[in-house]
Amino acid sequence: MTTTATEHAIGAAMPARRRGPAATLHDSWVVAKRNLRRMTRIPEIVVFGLMQPVMFVLLFSYVMGGAIKIPGANSSSHTYIQFLMAGIFAQTVTFAVAGASAGIAEDMTKGLVDRFRSLPMARSAVLAGRTLADLCQTAFTLVVLGLVALLVGWRIHDGVLKALGAFGLLLLLGYAFSWIGALIGLSVRSPEAATSAGLIWLFPLTFVSNAFVPVTSMPGWLQGVAYWNPFSATVQACRDLFGNQVGPVDSAWPMQHAALVSVLWSVVITAVFSWLSVRKYRSAAG
Amino acid sequence: MAPAIQAENLVKTFGDVRALDGVSLDVPEGTVLGLLGPNGAGKTTTVRVLTTLLRPDSGRAVVAGVDVLEHPDRVRSLIGLSGQYAAVDEYLTGFENLTMVGELYQMSARAAKARALELLEWFNLTEAKNRTAKTYSGGMRRRLDLAAALVVRPPVMFLDEPTTGLDPRNRLALWEVIETLVEQGTTLLLTTQYLEEADRLAHDIAVVDHGRVIARGTADQLKAQIGGERIELVVHEPGEIADAVAALSRYALGEPTVERNTRKITVPVSGGARVLADAIRELDGRGVEIDDIGLRRPTLDDVFLTLTGHVAETAEENGAEADVRGPEEQQAVAAGKGQ
């Protein structure tokens, strides 16, 4: 701690404060960079995040694929993988909830959030930065998962552009769900509780849908729930865009307009949950 | 000149607990206020209100001329906060931590990096700059945390128990850093449980207990408030005790106490070092041989005990160096032995 170093250390000028959406975006990106760096330092999180969907692909296609009948298709595990992949992709992106909820809960229990809250940064940036980082992780996971699926026989049939559109819908859904995770993370305040609270409701949500079995095989009262499930719309839209639809599309309105319904759900979930989360963050730790 | 930190009648309740029960304080620009108090007294809550982390139920606060409740965002760009536990991201390197904070203060990436390197050098962390903070020792993390609070050289700083849990060497190093900051004009509010720390760093001390400021003044004023200055001396031969007592009688404010087996004489006085010098001359003139002599003032521990009615929690942690008895009690014990 020499004198010259001290003089240097003291010399920094107070930067002018920028405001508005540009500043919010900048702050969010700084926080996102921080979270992405953390992911590279703890690669286990990314690796285990990958293993789960890969395992699902292998188990569903090889173990259960032969037993599940898709209407209008000659039953074989090769056909089931075409039907299955949209569901697996969609389930994988919704699992971003767990990452966001655990990450936010961990930040809240450490002093780091006090540091952030004492800085002149955008109030929403801590959460937005988290969801942005999760979006990057989700994109990475989708790429790896897509390659594994190609290896076991999954194919896209309607061209790359439409497939990219499907991945766009998936990322949008994942982004929306990470805001649900943010709210959970802010509400539970313990990383362990956040992980289970983030995952538990995802199982009924993803299974009461068209993801793994045809909705027509469910009892009538459940079919309505499954058709209007935000998750089902994205799955159906992806099947359409990948050219993976086996047989005719169900006649329910959300299934006939799946891409539109998928986008609407994602936008509404993002809007509602980001508003709730930021509001909670402002008053949190109070 | 307006105070750099001003709080008026802050009240904050958590359920049934009245964490702040009307805290008022002011810190003149360029000075250090030590907020001294036991655990749960309201020190941290006060800091959280003043640093915009917590809204009080009532009361008013102004930091660096800006109203904390009306313009929290403007206050945030004028303050630095270093908390009780090191608020750094342990999976980022020291360099990345500081750069991130700089960028969140809206510095350009280049300026933030340059500033991070300066601070790392100042805090002796240059060699560890590319290691994740997880690998840092407790002292290194605390230095990094303090460095993060200094990224924009804020005019007002809040340090919440900055040295709690540090070993003496690291504590001393951090004290030196804090003293440098104050020399350069930073206004500082420091909370501590260490009486020694408040004594050394703070110009003014506010003693907090049960959410209220129960005493305020310089360390000397607080000590004088409870009185008890005295000369203690040890003579070489037991036969010199009578001579020594006679020599000191003109300075004594009360009855001297004598412990014959240790040849120790305690005389209550007032007037500080001058009296001590006079007493030594007098003793010397009478040819009394002295083994040890000194002017004893009550410690801040004595002050704390007298004011709050309980001992500072850290007394045991400190290795019980602090004498937990009040001065009156000590004198009474000494007098009892002497007879």
Image: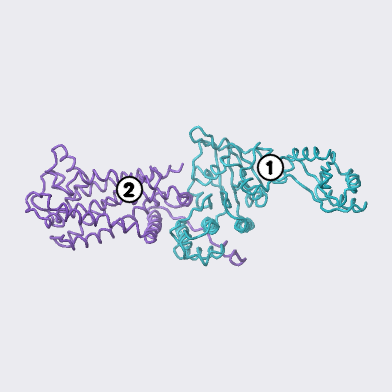
Chain colours: A purple, B cyan
* Residue at the spot 55% in from the left edge and 55% down from the top edge: B154
Most extreme residue toward the right is: B286
Q: Is residue B184 visible?
A: no
Between the residue at mark 2 and the residue at mark 1, the CA separation in whole angstroms equals 54 Å
Q: Amino acid at mark 2?
A: Trp
Residue A153 lies, in percent from the top left, at: 15, 61
Task: Judge the density around disc 2: few (<14), some (14-19), many (≥20) Cα neighbours within 10 Å.
Answer: many
Where is residue B301? Give x, y as percent. 68, 44
Secondary structure of the residue carrying numbered label 1: loop
Subunit bearing disc 1: B
Instruction: Identify the chain of the residue marked 2, using the numbered disc in the image.
Output: A
| Extreme residue in the front direction | B261
Residue at image point 77% right, 41% down: B228
Residue position marked by numbered label 1 in the rendering: B324
Residue A235 marker = none
Q: Is residue A269 visible?
A: yes
Question: Which residue is found at the position 19% from the left and 48% from the top?
Answer: A233
Say which residue label 2 marks.
Answer: A179
In this picture, residue A167 sits left or right of residue A35: left
Residue A152's x, y, as percent? 17, 61
- The type of residue carrying mark 1 is Val
Front residue of B213 and B329: B329
Which quadrant of the figure contains the C terminus of chain B? top right
Relative to A111, is B210 above or below? Answer: above
Helix, strand or loop at label 2? It is helix
Q: Is residue B177 left or right of residue A64?
A: right
In the rendered image, the vertical position of residue B177 relative to residue A102, given as above or below = below
Counting from the top left corner in percent of width and height, residue B317 is at 61, 47
User: Across the whole image, how many numbered discs are drawn on residues?
Assistant: 2
